[in-house]
Image (cartoon, grey):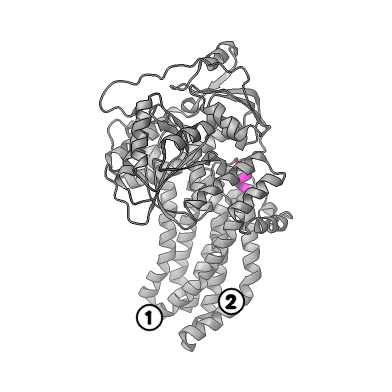
Amino acid sequence: MVQGSGGPELSQEAFGYGSKVYGVELLGTLYTQFDKIIILALLTPRDFGLYSVVFALSRIYNAVQTAISNVVFPKVTGLPQEQIIRTVGRAFRISLMVMMIIVIPTMFIGNYLMGLLFGSEFLEASVAFYILAVECIIGGGSWILASAFNALGRPGLVMIRQLIALSVTVALFFVFTPLWGLNGIAIALLIGSIVRMVVTVAAMKIVFKVKFAAMFYDKEDLPFLYERLNKKEEESPKEEMEMLGTNNIHPMEELKGHLRQILKVIPPRTEIYYLDYPVHSNGGDLLIMKGTEAFFRDNDIHVRARYSILDCPLSLKVPEGITIVLHGGGNFGDLYPAHQKLRERMIAQHPNHRIVILPQTMFYKSDIELKKTAQVFNRHKDVHFFVRDTLSYEIASKEFQQTNVYLSPDMAHQLWPLKSKSKPSAEMLYFFRKDIEKTQNQVHYESVSGPKATFKDWETLYNRVDRKIIRMITSRLKSGKGSSFARWLWYKYSDRMVHTAIKEFNQYQTITTSRLHGHILACLLDQPNILLDNSYGKNSNYYAAWTKSNPAGRLESNQTSAYNKPTETGKGASTVVLSDGAAL
């Protein structure tokens, strides 16, 4: 137990949440290995060799099914429930349909290849191969359908499904294997996959009220598949930018397309270290993190290691050939020195590595501190710095003369579109910041809005349990005890937090916000919103550079030049100020 992390009740809730997802993975591993144990116990080594070959050959359908899913199954974490179910259901139907169409001819080819590559003696296991091929398709389809439960924060349903299927399959192993040998094992696995499918479909109908027919048929699937396949045709960045400039597309889709310029310095299949990912309740940083991870996945960028500011070693050893990628946001400068020192330390310690800083906004109160940063940057020959507004671009281009500087929108735009069919139940949400970037213009809004107005910020959007769980995770990361599990748990739990923010925004017709990512989240939802500036012009500069053409949002016209001075944090050598304003 970590001292000060919230007590036994908090730890039980946090690790209970994580253990459900982890339990699913553990049961899945047991499910795939138990058949080998049974063969070794009840059959001969020769049978084990035959089974290993036909099982591996049947798994080729997994690779094909994964490829199909990548085309039709975009990122669903944080989407509204209706969209998650619709997207997962479509991926399930299309993959199952296509696989059933190709399964018969490819099974015959597989039988021929088995005899050609391994010899005629392996043909006696051909029946087991046919059965395992069908089992692979049904089992893979049920996994796609069950992914909706994880995305909606219900991993316990998947774990229950796995327990039921594993119990049935193991029992059938002991019944069928003595009777039919390898075919018996294959039949037991097939029945287990059918049980998983039945339980999953039943859970979808009972828990999420999805109609049975809708899970297996939708007349729009084939047109959708045709459209997605056409979109997957490769285009050069130049061709795509020309397309964005000439076609009548949504402004948010255009901004998402602009992010592809990052591929010039982080090409697909690049291996990277992703540093300074956020571990706090600032939903803006979480949206950036989720957009960044989506960008990595969508473009086949391989993340070898992840470190936050809490657990990044002072002397991080990075293998040769790895690109160091630093999280984007609005903390570049001297307002948040902990993050800035991390960036500068990585640049100084790794002169021979490519270093990429994802889209940031720069702000320095002190010109002396800016010059110190410039000295660090100018000693490195392969730093690539993406900035989110023209003012930051001008400053960086002038001061960082050895650095490649690019103008780019925020990484959260990779999440477009976030759509919801739910209807708002209230008129206006005032989503106002309470940290050192608060302005007098915002104070004016707060004073004239009336007693019934709803005010929220990232820190009030989440409840006491959320905040205590975050503190527990940060304590784990800082101590280094169980940091791998804490990192894994945080990624799962932050999915839930993003989903909470989306649900909250969906309750209101209009959002008035001084948070840049309150504005961006509303735009991602295609929701009317009014943006107030922050203390140093970050919001207005971003609006002018990127979102001005989006009809859903507008910049508040009566901006004032007055702003609050940065809030002083508590004194003490152990205090670290993070970009959410929290002292850890």
Q: Name the residue under label 2.
A: 107
In the visual, does 276 lie left or right of 286?
left
- The mark tally for this picture is 2
Which x, y percent locates residue 41? Answer: 36, 73
Mark 1, residues whose alpha carbon is within 10 Å: few (<14), some, or many (≥20)? Answer: few
In this view, 312 is above or below 537: below
Q: Mark 1 points at which residue?
A: 44
Which type of secondary structure does the marked residue at label 1 adopt?
A: loop
The region drawn magenta spans 80-85
Q: Residue at x 48, y 25 (%)?
A: 460
Which x, y percent locates residue 186? Answer: 50, 72
556 or 66: which is nearer to us? 556
Q: Quadrant of the C terminus?
A: top left
120 or 199: which is nearer to us? 120
41 or 517: which is nearer to us? 517
Q: Residue furthest right?
A: 219
In this view, 84 is above or below 564: below
Q: Which of marks 1 and 2 is nearer the N terminus?
A: 1
For the stretch drawn in magenta, what is the main secondary structure?
helix
Q: Can residue 311 be seen in this view?
A: no
Callout 1 touching callout 2 (CB < 8 Å): no
Q: Residue at x 58, y 51 (%)?
A: 74
198 or 488: which is nearer to us? 488
Q: Can residue 362 be seen in this view?
A: yes
Which x, y percent locates residue 134? Answer: 57, 69
In the visual, does 56 lie left or right of 547?
left
Q: Quadrant of the N terminus?
A: top left
Which type of secondary structure does the marked residue at label 2 adopt?
A: helix
Dot 2 amino acid type: Met
Q: Which residue is drawn at 32% across and 44% down?
A: 483
Dot 1 amino acid type: Thr
